[in-house]
Image (cartoon, grey):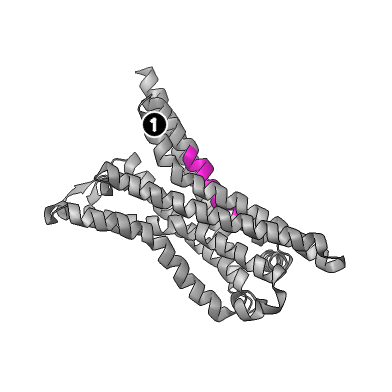
Amino acid sequence: MAANDSSVRVINDRVIIVQVFISLFLCINFLLITVFFMKDFFYTTMRYIFFALTLMSDCVFLILTDVLLILIYFHFSIHMSLCLIVYVASSVHTFVTPVTLTVMTLERFVAICMPLRHRELCSTRSALHCILIIHGISSLPCVVVLSIFFASVNRSYYTQSGECSVEKFILHTWQGHIRSAISQFYFLVMVIIIMFSYFKIMKVARAASGQNRKSTWKGLRTVVLHGFQLLLCLFQLWCPFIETAVLQISLVLYVNVRYFNYIMFILSPRCLSPLIYGLRDEKFFVALRSFVLCGLYKKQLSN
């Protein structure tokens, strides 16, 4: 009995810790999104538009995963049609951030290696087209999984209720293999793009001089950070396979590994976007500091 109480207490503490982290990340992201819409320069510049896209995508993803976590924790049953909507949204936004990071890396590549064409290729109009392409690419894995799912179940399945999870829509072993193959393909393409951009920018950085050299090395560091963030995001695609293997060994170990994966590969990458552009980018940091300090100053006057 004491062991069960201790186990329940640990689970409760973990859920509370997750709520604290998610609340903190959401507050920071909403603050940065507010700053983004305050300056014309930000929402007319491609890299800041993509930055805002990652923030919004991360917010949606964190909210949806947290809702699923709470539903599973309290053993709530929901209608399968509602679960389907949640799955579609979470599945799409699982890929939106890594795909956007890859496009942001390409934008840095164009800015540094093709500066004369940067204004032409990276206009606001191009950014809006890229956003549509990003969401289209991010939707493909979900479309494949759901196409197989719709062809495999009858109408009565949609009227059922139960706990909502991704596994509800993976009905066949080979269906899981197809999803895995798509994820691995995405991983390979993104890694190739990141590595290609890195080596091209490195080549330009070595040949540059003066102010151009400083700007180029800064862009190179940004690409490295994108690569690290992308790596964490893509590890999330491997988590289900690791968790399935661990489940065969021990249920307790499975719970611990799944919690670690959630913190490390789902929450952590979502907190790096504010650091890469919100704090490292000089223009955005100045706007953020001005917004925060102005708010504090007005609060002091009102007191």
Residue range corresponding to the magenta coloring: 261-272
Q: Amino acid at mark 1?
A: Ala
Residue 17 image offset from top left, x and y in percent: 50, 40
Figure check: 149 above or below 13: below
Instruction: Say which residue label 1 marks.
Output: 245
The answer to whether residue 234 is magenta is no
Towards the viewer: 137 or 76 = 137
For the N terminus, give its image quadrant: top left
Q: How many marks?
A: 1
Figure check: 234 above or below 252: below
| Residue at horizontal 66 percent and vertical 66 percent from the top | 108
Q: Main secondary structure of the magenta part?
A: helix
Figure check: 119 above or below 5: below
Residue 254 image offset from top left, x and y in percent: 40, 30
Residue 150 visible: yes
Q: Quadrant of residue 217?
A: bottom right
- Position of 251 with respect to 163 (left or right) is right
Towards the viewer: 229 or 220 = 220
- Position of 253 with respect to 77 (left or right) is right
Residue 221 image offset from top left, x and y in percent: 71, 56
Residue 33 image offset from top left, x and y in percent: 56, 66
Q: Secondary structure at mark 1?
A: helix
| Residue at horizontal 51 percent and vertical 41 percent from the top | 263
